[in-house]
Structures are given as C-alpha cells and as structure tokens.
Amino acid sequence: MTRPIENHSRRRFLKGAAGLTLAIYFPWSFAQNAAKREAPAATFEPNAFLRIGEDNAVTVIAKHLEMGQGTYTGLATIVAEELDADWSQVRVESAPADASRYNNLNWGPMQGTGGSSAIANSWEQLRQAGAAARAMLVAAAVQRWQVPADSITVAEGVLRHTASGRQASFGELARAAAEQPVPEQVRLKKPSDFKLIGQRLARKDSAEKTNGSAIYTQDIHLPDMLTAVVAHPPRFGAMVASYDAEPALAIDGVVEVVAIPTGVAVLARDTWTAKRGRDALRVEWNESAALRLSSARAFEQFRALAETPGNVAREEGDSEAALGSAARTLEAEYDFPYLAHAAMEPMNCVIRLNGEGCDTWFGAQMQTHDQAVLAELFGLEPEQVRIHTLYAGGSFGRRASKGGDYILETAHIVKAIDGRAPVKLVWLREDDMQGGNYRPMFHHRLRAGLDAQGQLVAWQHRLVGQSVAAGSPFEGAIQNGIDATSVEGAANLPYAIPNMRVDLHTPGDIGVPVQWWRAVGSTHTAFSTECFIDELAQAAGQDPVAWRLAMLEAHPRHAGVLKLVAEKAGWSQPLESGKNGERRGRGVAVHEAFGSFVAQVAEVTVESDGRYRVDRVVCAVDCGIVVNPDVVLAQVEGGVGFALSAAMNEAITFTDGNVDQSNFHDYSPLRIADMPRVELHIVPSTAAPTGIGEPPVAPLAPAVVNALAAATGKRVRRLPIGQQLSG
Amino acid sequence: MGHFMITLNINGEEKSVAVAPDTPLLWVLRDTLQLTGTKYGCGMSLCGACTVHMDGQAVRSCSTPVSAAAGAKVITIEGVGEGVTGKAVQQAWQGLDVVQCGYCQSGQIMSAVALLDGNRTPTDADIDQAMGGNLCRCATYVRIRAAIHDAARSLA
C-alpha cells in the first residue's frame, strides 16, 4: 500500500536542523549539548523520529513518556519494522518538547501521553518514518552499487544485492542516505510481512532498570543544585499566614527558606537536610478559605443530588414509562471513593534557569502544556523552556498534571531564589499522598426494569461526581454540562435496551483537586454497569454470559472478547469447589475503553470468616493489531493488579478537610501475596492498534465483585471492598 | 546534630562521608555518594524501594541511620551483580522483562537476592513472605515470582 506522508510540517526539519532532534544529552552542561548539536554531520536523520549513526545504531526518538507501559519498546518496534532494522541495533531517546513535530495526533497541537493513545496515534506516523528512512538507505545503495532498487533486499539492518554478493550495513550507508531526497510517498508493509510487530521483542529499558543505572528525576544531581522540600498546608485552600524560618535555618546544610504560593520551601544541599528543615519550620496557616469536607457528608450531598434529574448524556425511548410498566424493577446505588495514584516515585521536578531560558528534567507527561506553564511564569517563549523527559517511576495519570502543579511549584521556588541555583523539588510520600489530583469520588444510582419474559426493557443510570476535564487542557470534552470522561462507559453502554436514560450531576464546589486516574471514567462506570447487569441476569434467572451476549448483537467486538474469555475460563464447566468451609465463585465483566475491548473472568475463594482472595483472572482482549504481545500481557497483568489494589483496599477520605491517609500504612496498595494468576487471550485482528495501558483496569473490579456475589450471595456496592464480607 | 566522618564499605569500596550520624543510609547513598539506584519511596520501611544488603541481610536503608552501617559490608543494586546470586537474579529479571516503570525494581531485586542467598529453593509461600515488604505499583508481581523461580533454577 502506498500512502502520502501526512505530516508535512515534519519535512521542514529534514535537513539542517539535525541537532534539534537530540533530546537528552545528559545533563551536566548545556555547553556539552551544544557541542554535540554541531557534531552529527555523519548521522542520517531522515525525519524527526529516528537517527542512524555511522556506528550502525538506530536511535528512535520517542515523543511519548515511558512510565512503565512499555511505549519505548512499542514505538521503536513500529519504526524498526518498516526500516527492517535489527532489534539489537535499536535504541530509544526521548523527544524534546515540540508540538509542531511531536504532538499527539489524537490530541491536536499538543504533545503528551495519555488515554492509552501512544501506539494508536503513532502507528501510521512511525511506520511512515521507518519506511521513508528505509527508502533513502535503498536509494543510497542504488547509487553506490549502480543496480536497480528492486534488486536490493533489506533485512535485519543489512542491505544486500544478492546477484553481486554486495552488502552494506545501515551505518555504512548512513552518510550517503542523508544525501538522498526524502520520498514524497512511501510503501508500507502488508501486515502479513511483519517480522517484528507481533513478536515478543525484549523491552528496551530492562537492563538499565535492573542494574540501578536508569535515571529518574529523583536521581538528577546538577552542580550547585539545591534540593527543596515544601511545607504544604494541611487543608486544600489554606494559605501561609506567617512562618518562622529560624529553626530551619539553624540546621547545618539548610541554605534558604522561601515562601511560595503553595507553602514554604526549604532548600538544602541534600534531601534529608531539606526534610529536617521542613519539619523544623513553624508555619501559621490562614484557613479562612480552607476545605472542610468530610467524605461521609459529601456522599450524603451526592445522594441528595441523585434524587433530582441531571444533565442528560443519553436518552432513548421512554425509560420512565417503561419502568412504570415493567414486570419487575431493580435499583442499586454504588459509591466510589477518591483514589490516589501513589506512583512509586513521588512527584518531583528539576529546573535550572540560564541565560538562554531554562532546562527542566522530569517525567513529563504533557510536555507542551508544562512548557507553556513554565514559559508563562518565567516570562519566556515556550521554545526557551527545554524539557528533558526522563523515565517516570509510575504515573497512572498523575504526571499529566492540570496546570502543572508540582512543576509550577518547582518553578516558583526557582523564581523565589532568583534562579541562583538549579532546584530539585522532592515531594515526600506524604506530600504526594495528600497532594490531591485524585480520581474523583462518585455516586451512581441505577434503576432497571425487566418484562415478564425477563427481557431488560428499561435502564436509568444517574452519576454524581466532579469533572476531571474541568480546568484542564481537555475542557473541550465538556459539552452541554457533560464531561465525557465522567460518563464514558455509561453513556455508551453497548447492551440493546429499548428505553435508556443516562444523566450526570457535576458538583462544582467540592474543592478537592481531581484528575484522570488510569482508565478514568471507566474506573467507576464499568463497575456500576457490569455489577448491575450481573444482578439483573440473576434476577432474570439467566446465565450472566449468555444474557449479556443476547444483548450484544450490534457490538461484535464486545461479544468477541466475552465469548473468548468464557471459553478459556471454562465458564460452562463447574468451578472447582473449595476446601472445608471455603466458598468459591466466578464472575465476569466486559467493557470497552479507549477503543479496546476487554472481558475478564475472576475466580475467588471466600473463607468462613469473610476473608477472600482472587485466585485467577482470565482476560480476553481485542486491541487491534498487537505490536508486542508480551508488553500487552504485562499491561494486562499490571492492570489487573492495579485495579484489584483499588478494589480491595484503596480510598482517600477526608475528615474536616484533612486527608486521612498519608503513607503506605493507611493507603495500602496490593502486595505480592494478593496477586492472582493472570491469563491473557488475544483476539486476532487486522484493525489498527488501540491502547492497552488502561483498558484492562476497567472490568476487573466488577468481575471480582460478581464472583464474590456468586460465592456468598452478597453484592458489594461500595468500593473498596475492605471488610464488607466479614460483617 | 553536627557532621562526623563515617567510613562505609559500599560494594567492596571504602567510602568516607561527612554527614550527621542520624542521616538515613538511603540519603547518604543517593545524595552524598550519588549511588542513585537505591530509591526513596516512603521513608518508613513500608515499600521496600530502598532495600540494600548489610552483611548479607536485606535492610530498608530509609530507616537505617548511617551510623549503623559503619563497619558493615553494604551492597547496593549497583554492586549486587558482582555476586553469583545477584547476577542470576538480574538475568532472570531481564529474561522475563519483569520491569515496567522500574522504580521499585532495585529494591525488589535486593530482596530477591537476600531470599535466594538464604533459600535456594523458595516456594511461593517463601516468596510471599520475603517479598511482602516490597511494593510494586505497576503490579509486576506475577513476573517477580516467576523470575525468582527462574533464578533459583539457574542457581541449582
């Protein structure tokens, strides 16, 4: 197939701007960087996404953040496939912040990573980038060997002319390839010709992440750098009234104490001294505008709101009339707490001002957003803010920070000391846990009606919760009072139900900062819809899989994963029974998120005292063409564990405006003993790839809770599950 | 508290540092010696990201005052691959591509090496016990378990 190169703006950078694609030459001196920028005459840089050196290294420039999801490996695989590179010669480097070259094509003119879009939006772009480079290498060989292009083969990083026995590596042809014209059109491979895509290629970041050499923000040391730890207000909305810096400044190694809009920062030569200084500070807070929320009271408020109609996200037929005439109606309410992302690397950022602008190092997830935020504060042009995107020690949505909270905080500290020294802001675990930007708490109320034959004829779903998109660069997702991310998974419920209404209340005055959290709206909508459907199947006396399938005729990809998971989990055979006193159960859920389809069957064992464990999770996925099945498996395993963690134990709660949790003793993520066995089955597909980082999170909690209901008869409708089965 | 000279043995090398004696070993490793493979996660021995070995035992360096490390042989992720067990564990980790974000993995590997040094044939229950103090927010636990078994087989 032949396709035009779509991103013409890229071509401006093909020649003469070579150095601009050098991302992090790490990090000691900008002068060194500048020297390297002038050096790469011997390097072939056909476009913004790769560079081939005379040393035969193929360097793929990744515009997306590697936060664990394996995107460096996936992005590099796509380039290497069309280039016919050898996987061992491929390296990955992070791209600089630049919306003109590195924007997320799903997002418009903005660079960033989220919504499980990295592979999906890069698919065509990187295939074209690889294919264009390959064509230029072939053209160089044609010129050198004076043979027809179609007599040259390329495989595993080597060009060959079989008839004459000539061959050359990419490195040997790099300089000549750089002189070739950039092709206007490139031929992309047929999927049946893929050699790397679909294979289990080794991750590119494994070695450095197993020997301690991978560099995260926390690991940056710059000459003369100061480390900052901040005294944050105890409640959101409080301000510094006054502070006494003397006890902090009395500590050997504390260099400076400065007030910033978000608190008081203590700067020291090292992290521990900065922490001791922070702990020694005496700060008086002005709490006149502070949050006084209590979670219990907020849920009461949400329940009261749920008594009144909200903004309509979907309306079909007449659900009210259909409920009135139904043979049987059911109603259920579901409660979801705030959740912290609690990435293992707490939020942090390094900023250094210099004569030309500023350099920043962090796990940047929305590079051009953060760039704009920093440029505005410092009075710089965006291109004067150079972002060096490092590995992130987890994110789960947290580093895609609305308004750049911790990044902006770092900048305020740098500004407060007039840029005299580079600053590394370190949030301690407690700062991170209590720093907000949580998955919002939600209340759902569902009502449904069955006719005399047990058919589902009416469905009403009301949601109450804060908007994640509000105040973010994605505010456009809010239309007619509906934040699409609040109702995703609910407004597009796939089941064929003749009368439906989905509506939403978005309380705007809560005062708790909220943000996207891995799988976003589907973290709650998959739970309420798939638990309620399960309950209705039971009420109708139907098998939960068969009943769903009967309503999914118009949604073959949902049906496809559901059938596959049922087959692989042995749904039609009885579950092996438990040992003495143990009850066992099996539950199912299916959900679409970010264009991918996931079904899971969970098997649980409940002991006589109500303690339970999830033994096994069988998962079926349809995410289009699979670039790397092992990375998909890793995301399914991790997504299951991340979702189970939240379902079992996680909650951020408030008492009189204070966050009740502070560290891993009272916000306790899943540990190894609670991790179930995970099996993955992939639906073969020729569709373009969709995401896999978030979709496996969505159906896990409903599958588990449906399994617990099958085992015990008790339906948990409030997350986390906690001790609810023990009562 | 004033600063004192303390001599440490890190990965077989003698290092003298001038720090307050109650400074956690973690921050001496990271900030003073710039051995940044050992990670900060919680500061309260809750997550295991800071795990190092002191005389062969896995300890949480975030809660170990540097003074307690004087005279001990300290091994960090940067040095653990010099040992037979450490090398086997790192190879098993790479063979299965255990890592995702990778931030906790130094600590996971240090705990796994300490486990295998004391028990060459750990059961799943042994692994749950020995690794229960190491959080992985990416939930790479399936592969951590499998990699420990792989390493045990390669060491047999």
Image (spheres, coloured by chain):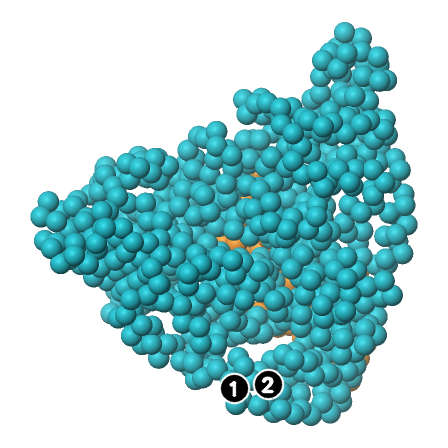
Chain colours: A cyan, B orange
What is the three-letter code of the residue carrying label 2?
Answer: Met
| Quarter placement of the N terminus of chain A | top right
Q: Secondary structure at mark 2?
A: strand
Q: Chain of mark 1?
A: A
Residue positioned most to the front: A480
**x, y percent for residue A299:** 34, 74
**x, y percent for residue A695:** 45, 48
Q: CB under 8 Å between callouts 2 and 1?
A: yes
Q: Nearer the viewer, residue A185 or B78?
A: A185
Q: Relative to A234, is A62 on the left or the right? A: right
**Residue depicted at x 67% and y 38%:** A7
Q: Chain of mark 2?
A: A
**x, y percent for residue A84:** 68, 26
Q: Quadrant of residue A286?
A: bottom right
Residue positioned most to the top: A163
Identify residue for label 2: A239
Q: Nearer the viewer, residue B6 or A705?
A: A705
What is the three-letter code of the residue carrying label 1?
Answer: Ala
Q: CA distance from mark 2 to mark 1?
A: 8 Å
Identify residue for label 1: A289
| Quarter placement of the C terminus of chain A | bottom left
Q: Earlier in the sequence, mark 2 or mark 1?
A: 2
Whether residue A86 is visible here, answered yes or no, is no
Q: Nearer the viewer, residue A425 or A380?
A: A380
**Residue depicted at x 16% and y 46%:** A455
Q: Quadrant of residue A45?
A: top right
